[in-house]
Amino acid sequence: MLEELIMGAPWRDWRSPTVFGLALSCTLSLSGCGGKPPQAQTSMGVPVKLETLTADQLTTTTEYVGVLEADNLVTLKPEVDGIVRNIQIQEGDTVTAGTPILTLRAERSQASVQQAIAGVEAARAAQTNAEAQLSAVDAEKLEAQADLKLREQDSQRIKALVDTGALPQRDLDQSRRDVEVAKARLNTINQRIKAAQASVNQAKANLRQSTNTVAIANEDLRETHITAPVTGTIGDLAVQEGDYLEQGQTIATIAQNTRLSLNFFVPIEQASNLRLSLPVELIDYRTLETVGRGQVSFISPEVDFTSQTILAKASFENPDKRLFTGQLVKAKLILSQKTGVSVPVTAVSRIGAETFVFVAAPNPEAQGETAPPFIAIQKPVTLGAIEGDRYQVLEGLSTGEQVITTGILNLTDGIPVFPQAEEVFQ
């Protein structure tokens, strides 16, 4: 261009200040901005950050959503109707088994107990009377048996005298009638004994029934004093003093949060991965932090027909009370664990359907202290699941290799690089 400008100008014009200045400007521009700068920048190397790969724990996981439930959750309900006289606990209190919860007015129950006791006394008196009547009839029986025996003996003697002619026949007939009368009397007494024995048995049954009525009345009276059946924390109180409670109405709940369970449903196609004792981590939805660790404790033998899922349960210890009944959580089921390597997501590049990372290798052309010590080598890798901000590497990398984690968009295979800092990032 400069030659054309000079040669194309008239001889008288190329020495002019304007032409000479233009030529000088173009010459300086070419010398300062000519095509060499890219090679100069490349020869210095691209600054990058490196991470030396170390052994990492690689896990295969799947996530589910569920609600925590206390293993021991008791709903307090009264066994009798009544009006709440006083409440001895507050919401959130920790109670032990046997701790008084509330008391119902016991006037009706006390009256029932007194009435039942009176019924027992009446039944006992009736039994005593029936037994006395039975004893009296038993005594009559003994007398009738003795009278019958005596008359039978007399009849035998009279028959002997009649046979010898000492007494007339009518005396024997009269004696025999007396024997029959004594037998009839004895039979009547036996029937009275049976009736008296039946009266005694009925009186005993009535006494037992009355005694049971007293026991039930006393139990109802005791049921007006409601106590905690288990150790735990009191939930929301659904009653106040003065409320009328019906039998079976909810008072409150008592939850033992020291151990909780999570129910989750696994699709049937993943059922083969389920095993008892598989580790499970709980993730808080709000903070995304791990709030509990447990294991699979139950796998249902049946499939839900509608959803085609299997119910599984995981149990979690809760010593520090970080977990709560009814808490919605994300459960991470750990299917397998093995040792491998992982890389930051910033180290991964994609070309089509393939994934690559750049690793730093010694520069074979490095000469002198100013030459870049490494070159970037592009390696294809097979990635697994992503955990946080890192990919699991299934194939393509091994421990000890230095992965380039920054500036990968400026890299090509074989380009010189140098660490941005002296330290090696891990």
Image (spheres, helix red, strand yellow):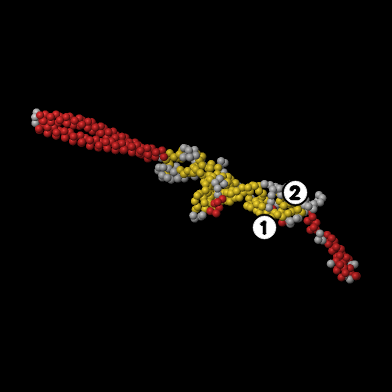
What amino acid does circle 2 point to?
Answer: Ala
Residue 86 location (% of width, % of height): 44, 40
Residue beneath the point at 12% across and 29% down = 160
Task: Please tell me how crowded label 2 is: few (under 14), some (14-19), or many (20+) other residues with Cα within 10 Å.
Answer: few
Of residues 169 and 42, the one drawn nearer to the viewer in this rendering: 169
Residue 424 in sight in this render: yes
Residue 336 location (% of width, % of height): 60, 48
Q: Is residue 371 above or below residue 232?
A: below
Q: Is residue 18 above or below residue 275?
A: below
Q: Secondary structure at mark 1?
A: strand
Residue 107 location (% of width, % of height): 38, 39
Q: Secondary structure at mark 2?
A: loop
Of residues 255 and 82, the one drawn nearer to the viewer in this rendering: 255
| Residue at the far front in the pictured view | 164
Residue 417 in sight in this render: no
Where, by quadrant of the figure, is residue 153 drawn? top left
Q: Which residue is mark 2?
A: 421
Q: Is 72 on the left or on the right of 345, as rendered?
A: left
Residue beneath the point at 87% across and 63% down = 24
Q: Which mark is residue 130?
A: none
Between the residue at mark 1 and the residue at mark 2, the CA separation in whole angstroms equals 30 Å
Q: Is 316 on the left or on the right of 159, as rendered?
A: right
Precedes in sequence: disc 1 or disc 2: 1
Q: Is 189 on the left or on the right of 94, as rendered?
A: left
Q: Quadrant of the N terminus?
A: bottom right
Q: Which mark is residue 354?
A: 1
Residue 152 location (% of width, % of height): 17, 31
What amino acid does circle 1 point to?
Answer: Glu
Residue beneath the point at 90% across and 70% down = 11
Q: Is 162 on the left or on the right of 272, as rendered?
A: left
Task: Please tell me how crowded label 1 is: few (under 14), some (14-19), or many (20+) other residues with Cα within 10 Å.
Answer: few
- Look at discs 1 and 2 and give the one toward the viewer: 1
